[in-house]
């Protein structure tokens, strides 16, 4: 009995440590965001906002186009998600269900894109986008993001499609359904959970992407949140309290996705790993 | 649906994605390969021309390249190693959790889901030598005389690795947790009947069966760690001996405008990552067969 209690205690300590380790940096940034800018220069530091203030958040929304940056991120991430799914879902269905010739070659093509260093793609993409006059506009980010998230989307969706029973399409076919209708009306609705999982992961990727956004946008109005955050420091003398507030605002969408769809994210990350 | 109909449907379903990947992806990738044999600096654009292997010769004798390759390899080996050990520990703990699993998983996913830029910003605030929380706590505990310069020349790489471990250990833990769950309970029951100790069970059941999952986690993490950019760019900008290959390539391409040599290094980085992943995949296959 004593041994059992000792075991449980050890587990509780380990759990606690894990949660604290994961969350305390987030807590600290929230604390700084809610404290007056001078609080950081106190010694020793206060571990709670003392007193709590909202001026940093007001500063975020009043200066530097930050609301515009948030809107940019939303548009870019949403369009990327839609485009990736529109291209990736049919491809994944074909790879999972129809005997595709040269399937390995196609998979290798996607894999190659996933392995190639992103830093190397940007130069040529920049020149191409510049020629098309797309720099600082949404397609300049949406198109490369779609390219980068397609391998992951195809991987996840192929896995999901191959778990659905084949008898469904066969039944639809017997009933005189065209293959295209079978896909849109029977398979796609059934694969909705998988499609949704892929959507969450793509959105998070696009919301967080930094390197392409850094190079393919050059004006404050066209920047996305990560770039705006990283360049905040350059504009002023490190206004840490404002940076902290901006950070808190910028992670809210991602935190909401994690809180709501944690199970799906885990599913998506581990899909296909189980073979 | 007969075979021909199937083939036609497959073609039309795959065509949009493949066209997209070829037009948008193959073009930059191939032009990198072409540029790597070219002398092309944006600042001296009129001197553009075929350069043969001279960029590769420059690479071989470029001390900075080799030094940064060393930084990159060190960063990759240490951070992926730590992430594996800590991720395994976290997965073992999570595997035992019955109540509060959702809350645990959610908090675990937070570091993974945050933008890398945000993670880096958080850590540069925590580790700041004058106003950082870490130094303040150390001072309060009486463990520190002079402020520790976490992002200075001596400790910067360690700090960068710490931030990376914080951000990506959850990913490794989630993959390994899926692995732990895939191990049939009978094995453990049989081992318990044989009176096997906990360590023996871990060594001869858990670890061997987990091997393919460990290999996948290491593969994904190694590929990412070798190309690390955002984290280091925000934390140190590549200063204090933390410059990795991606940061150096960024410098050559976008500061010096040297598209030729920058592309050569990109190709080199691609080849390294490609060979590394092939090696890991082969290792995975072998460990899968011996099962």
Image (tube, rainbow, N blue to C red):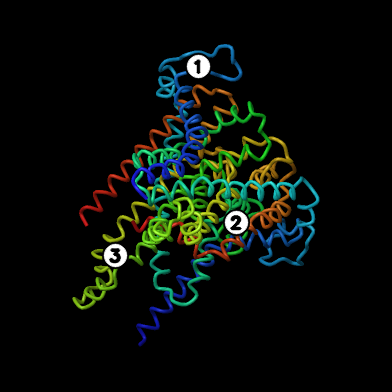
Query: Image height check: is B151 above or below A255?
Result: above
| Residue B100 seen in this snapshot | yes
Parent chain of label 2: B
Label 1, secondary structure: give it. strand
Q: Which mark is residue B39?
A: 1
- Element type at marker 2? helix
- Chain for mark 1? B
Please report the residue visible at 56 percent of the width from the left and 31 percent of the height from the top: A125
Q: Identify the residue position indicated by label 2 in the image.
A: B135
Are circles 2 and 3 on residues that touch, CB within 8 Å?
no
Residue B24 placement, left or right of B96: right
Q: From where the camera sits, is residue B78 visible?
A: no
**Residue A259 percent coordinates (x, y):** 58, 65
How packed is label 3: few (under 14 Cα within 10 Å), some, or many (20 or more)?
A: some
B54 left or right of A57 in image:
left
- Mark nearer the N terminus (2 vs 3): 2
The N terminus of chain A is located in which quarter?
bottom left
Q: Say if A95 sits above or below A19 in the image.
A: above
Say above or below: A108 vs B177: above
Q: Name the image quarter holding residue A215.
A: top right
Looking at the rendered structure, the secondary structure element under dot 3 is helix
Q: Which residue is mark 3?
A: B206
Mark 2: few/some/many CA within 10 Å (<14, 14-19, 20+): many
């Amino acid at each position: 009995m004593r041994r059992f209690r000792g075991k449980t205690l050890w587990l509780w300590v380990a759990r606690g440590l894990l949660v604290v380790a994961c969350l305390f940096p987030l807590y600290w940034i929230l604390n700084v965001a809610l404290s007056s800018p001078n609080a950081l220069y106190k010694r020793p530091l206060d571990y709670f906002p003392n007193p709590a203030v909202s001026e940093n958040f007001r500063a975020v929304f009043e200066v530097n186009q930050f609301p515009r940056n948030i809107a940019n991120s939303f548009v870019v991430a949403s369009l990327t998600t839609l485009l990736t799914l529109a291209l990736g879902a049919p491809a994944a269905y074909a790879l999972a269900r129809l005997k595709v010739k040269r399937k390995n070659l196609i998979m290798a093509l996607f894999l190659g894109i996933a392995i190639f260093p992103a830093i190397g793609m940007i130069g040529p993409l920049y020149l191409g986008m510049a020629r098309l006059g797309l720099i600082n506009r949404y397609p300049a980010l949406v198109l490369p993001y779609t390219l980068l998230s397609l391998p992951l989307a195809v991987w996840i969706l192929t896995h999901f499609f191959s778990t659905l029973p084949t008898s469904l399409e066969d039944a639809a076919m017997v009933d005189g359904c065209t293959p295209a209708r079978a896909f849109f009306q029977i398979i796609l609705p059934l694969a909705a959970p998988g499609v949704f999982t892929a959507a969450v992961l793509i959105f998070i990727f696009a919301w967080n992407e930094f390197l392409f956004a850094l190079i393919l946008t050059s004006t404050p109005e066209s920047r996305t949140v990560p770039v705006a955050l990283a360049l905040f420091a350059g504009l002023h003398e490190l206004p840490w309290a404002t940076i902290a507030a901006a950070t808190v605002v910028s992670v809210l969408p991602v935190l909401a996705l994690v809180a709501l769809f944690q199970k799906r994210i885990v599913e998506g990350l581990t899909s296909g790993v189980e073979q | 649906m007969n075979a021909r109909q199937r083939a036609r449907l497959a073609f039309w379903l795959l065509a949009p994605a493949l066209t997209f990947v070829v037009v948008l992806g193959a073009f930059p990738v191939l032009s990198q390969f072409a540029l790597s044999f070219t002398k092309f600096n944006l600042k001296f654009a009129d001197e553009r021309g075929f350069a043969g292997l001279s960029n590769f010769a420059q690479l071989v004798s470029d001390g900075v390249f080799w030094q940064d390759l060393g930084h990159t390899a060190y960063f990759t080996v240490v951070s992926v190693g730590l992430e594996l050990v800590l991720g395994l520990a976290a997965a073992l703990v999570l595997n035992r959790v019955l109540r509060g699993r959702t809350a645990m998983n959610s908090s675990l996913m937070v570091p993974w889901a945050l933008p890398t830029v945000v993670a880096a910003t958080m850590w540069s605030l925590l580790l700041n030598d004058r106003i950082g929380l870490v130094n303040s706590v150390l001072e309060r505990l009486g463990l520190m005389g002079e402020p520790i310069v976490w992002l200075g020349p001596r400790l910067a790489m360690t700090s960068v690795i710490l931030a990376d471990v914080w951000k990506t250990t959850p990913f490794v833990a989630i993959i390994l947790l899926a692995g732990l769950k895939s191990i049939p309970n009978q094995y453990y029951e049989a081992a318990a009947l044989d009176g096997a100790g906990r360590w023996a069970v871990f060594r001869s059941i858990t670890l061997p069966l987990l091997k393919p999952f460990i290999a996948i986690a290491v593969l994904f993490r190694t590929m990412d760690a070798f190309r690390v950019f955002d984290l280091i760019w925000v934390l140190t900008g590549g200063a204090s001996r933390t410059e990795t290959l991606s940061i150096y390539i960024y410098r050559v391409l976008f500061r010096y405008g040297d598209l030729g040599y920058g592309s050569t290094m990109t190709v080199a980085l691609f080849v390294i990552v490609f060979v590394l992943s092939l090696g890991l995949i082969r290792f995975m296959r072998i460990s899968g067969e011996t099962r």
